[in-house]
């Protein structure tokens, strides 16, 4: 019976690389989520200013965001009107419409605008993290 030898140098190099890149990827990912939330909030407010002029003129000021996370690796942003703010409770009606009012889709349009930029930035973080050769 012969013994097989295995060169672990590449595995150790990958281990060192990941030890360096994972904290950076976490930091960069959180920054991308924050930037995306800010962009969506700004666009949502701008869209709402243009569509809710007469009956919802205070509504755009109610739009904001909150950051959250689940452990060290999952970041989220909750973006939308604050129901406690002036006209914030109109958010569902203005965004999705009703029987007598068409939907404005202010938040949906803001999200659609930001999504390609958001995905591009996350892809760059992943690409940078995987480039270890």
Image (cartoon, rainbow, N blue to C red):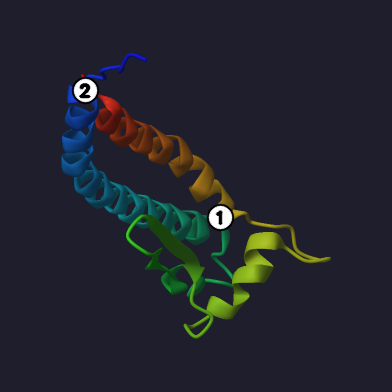
Q: Quadrant of the N terminus?
A: top left
Q: In this view, does 50 lie to the left or right of 13?
A: right
Q: Which residue is drawn at 40% across and 41% down?
A: 118
- Give the mark, 2 or 1, whose residue is nearer the N terminus: 2
Q: Is residue 16 above or below residue 77?
A: above
Q: Is residue 109 above or below residue 133?
A: below
Secondary structure under tag 1 reads helix
Q: Mark 2 points at which residue?
A: 10
Q: Residue at x 48, y 75 (%)?
A: 58
Residue 106 x, y percent position in the rendering: 56, 55
Secondary structure under tag 2 reads helix
User: Could you give the CA–CA distance between mark 2 and mark 1, rounded to whole angstroms?
Assistant: 50 Å
Q: Is residue 48 left or right of residue 35?
A: right
Classed neighbour count for the residue bearing mark 1: other residues with Cα under 10 Å, few (<14), some (14–19), many (≥20)? many
Residue 94, by quadrant, is bottom right
Q: In this view, does 88 lie above or below 6?
A: below
Q: Name the residue under label 1.
A: 106
Residue 26 x, y percent position in the rendering: 27, 50
Classed neighbour count for the residue bearing mark 2: other residues with Cα under 10 Å, few (<14), some (14–19), many (≥20)? few
Of 2 and 131, the residue lying toward us: 2
Q: Is residue 124 left or right of residue 106?
A: left
């Amino acid at each position: 019976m012969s013994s097989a030898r295995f060169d672990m140098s590449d595995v150790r190099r990958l281990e060192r690389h990941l030890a360096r890149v994972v904290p950076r990827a976490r930091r960069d990912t959180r920054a991308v989520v924050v930037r995306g939330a800010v962009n969506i909030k700004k666009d949502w407010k701008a869209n709402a200013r243009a569509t809710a002029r007469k009956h919802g003129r205070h509504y755009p000021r109610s739009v904001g965001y909150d950051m959250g996370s689940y452990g060290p690796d999952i970041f989220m942003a909750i973006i939308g009107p604050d129901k406690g703010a002036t006209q914030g409770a109109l958010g569902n009606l203005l965004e999705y419409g009703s029987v007598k009012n068409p939907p404005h889709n202010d938040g949906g349009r803001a999200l659609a605008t930001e999504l390609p930029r958001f995905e591009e930035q996350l892809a760059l973080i992943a690409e940078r993290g995987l480039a270890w050769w």
